[in-house]
Amino acid sequence: MSEAKASATEASNSSRNAAPIISAVDIGKHFPVRAGGSTVALRGVTIDIPRDQFVTIVGPSGCGKSTLLKMLAGVITPTAGELMLNDKALERPSRAVGMVFQRPVLLPWRSVIQNVLFPIELLGWPTARYHDQANKLIELVGLTGFEQALPRELSGGMQQRVSICRALIYDPEVLLMDEPFGALDAITREDLSIELLRIWTERRKTVVFVTHSITEAVLLADRVVVMAPRPGRVVLDLPISLPRPRNLATESTPEFGQYVATVRDAIHRDRR
Amino acid sequence: MRHTLRLWVTEYGQPTAALAALIVVWEIACDLLNIPVWLLPSPLQIVIQTWQIRSILPLHIFATFAEVVGGFALAIAAGVPLAIIIVYSPPLRRVIYPLLLMVQSVPKVAVAPLLLLWVGYGLTSNIIVAATVAFFPIVINTATGLESVDPELIELTRSLDARRLEVFWRVRLPWALPYLFSSLKVAITLAVIGAVVAEFIGADKGLGYLILTSSGEMKTSLMFGVLLILSLLGILCFYAVSWAERLLCPWYMPLPSDPSGAASG
């Protein structure tokens, strides 16, 4: 753990791990449409994601970023190209990934700790053995004391923290986050961004984080991938070498401003 | 303490007083206007006449109660599996839905004689009639509930490669429970209606049967008395279902309005 902490403090887009955990070569996805023919959701996407990298994907609606994330989750399969996870073709769901959605989607009849342990039950693993781990995660996200609370007794931000714990409980190698803070108010959103960075520092994971917010994308990432719609494709792949740990003050540095400008320019260039 | 007493008085005292006033007005009007007993009996006469048949009442109450509970249980036993089939099998859904609508749109009063012909006279046929009246909302609501599970939750279970049966027990069924209960509250009152309809058509006991025979003998007071008992029975059944709902889906009940209990942050 201490080793992970140490490495988190350095600018971490160094190539510590040569072999990428996720490797996509020229992948595409088209969906058949009712009228015949098909719509292209994604075309010619090539990305290598090294282990423990924090990648944010940013782009307007319809650019295929959610489709890409679902492919990484193994929930849908690409119709073209090659997608590998840990050097194996990613064709079906794998326990190597954990998912966090825009809304917390907790089970309303279960307490916080039962919600965190839910994946363990689904996987058919002994929940008793994961109790300590669940409590540790709940402590990590600052919800100690709320273990027995029902979701409806928590605020939106607290519920989203629970859903992050739920994604981490079975210790997946990759965390996929689909606009996880998109439904929160601006202040809670900033709090949780910083919180996520702290969690990531303590529990090193490969993170693929989809967002609409350019500043959020730059603040969190080792690397920002900009996507454009019709067809969904990658238009910019930008390493972010801002020093870590980052906080809200990072946003007022000139370097941060430059990154944001570059990303914004890439998004809008495509729209003209 | 005094505060809760005042709350109690507004909650229950006022309606009770209003009801009592209505009964008094009814009693006085019957006396003053000389309304014949067979047309509109006074409340006092209703009570006296009903009291006179108290020895046979339990038999009839129990008969109707058994039909209501039996019909309700049968409606659940048929309705919930049917809803599950509808949700899980699109081909069967296409077959079942039109049939379901047909069954629902046929007036049950018209089907009851047919059932009598097939199943025969008695408790079983009355239970079936009560069930056919009650089961439609159960099927529709349960199917809606099973389908209304958050798609992202289903995606989560798929990303974990969970078995469908597991997802059904741990996610879909509990998710549909509040939907099921809201339909059960409708179904239980429909089961009462169904039981009475069945007794109108063919029975030798039950509250519906009592109403029918009282009407034949122009015992209007008894008709009123039995109607009252019937509605009390219906209310009792309804509250029993509500109580079960509160017990089984506590997460769905309104939060206590105490603001200090709410979390923030």
Image (cartoon, coloured by chain):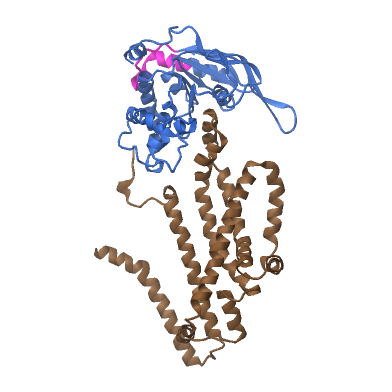
Q: Is residue A242 left or right of residue B52?
A: left
Q: Is residue B264 left or right of residue B251?
A: left
Which chain does the brown colour mark? B
Camera-side residue of A240 and B155: B155
Q: Is residue A173 left or right of residue B11?
A: right
One can see residue A90 in this view: yes
Query: Does the magenta segment cover residue A4?
Result: no
Which chain does the blue colour mark? A
Name, please, the residue furthest toward the left. B1
Q: Quadrant of the C terminus of chain A?
A: top right
**Residue drawn at (47%, 92%), measured in percent from left and top?**
B32
Span highlighted in magenta in the image: A240-261
**Residue drawn at (63%, 45%), measured in percent from left and top?**
B85
Horizontal and vertical percent for residue B75? 59, 57
Query: Does the magenta segment cover residue A259?
Result: yes
Camera-side residue of A175 and B10: A175
Horizontal and vertical percent for residue A119? 46, 31
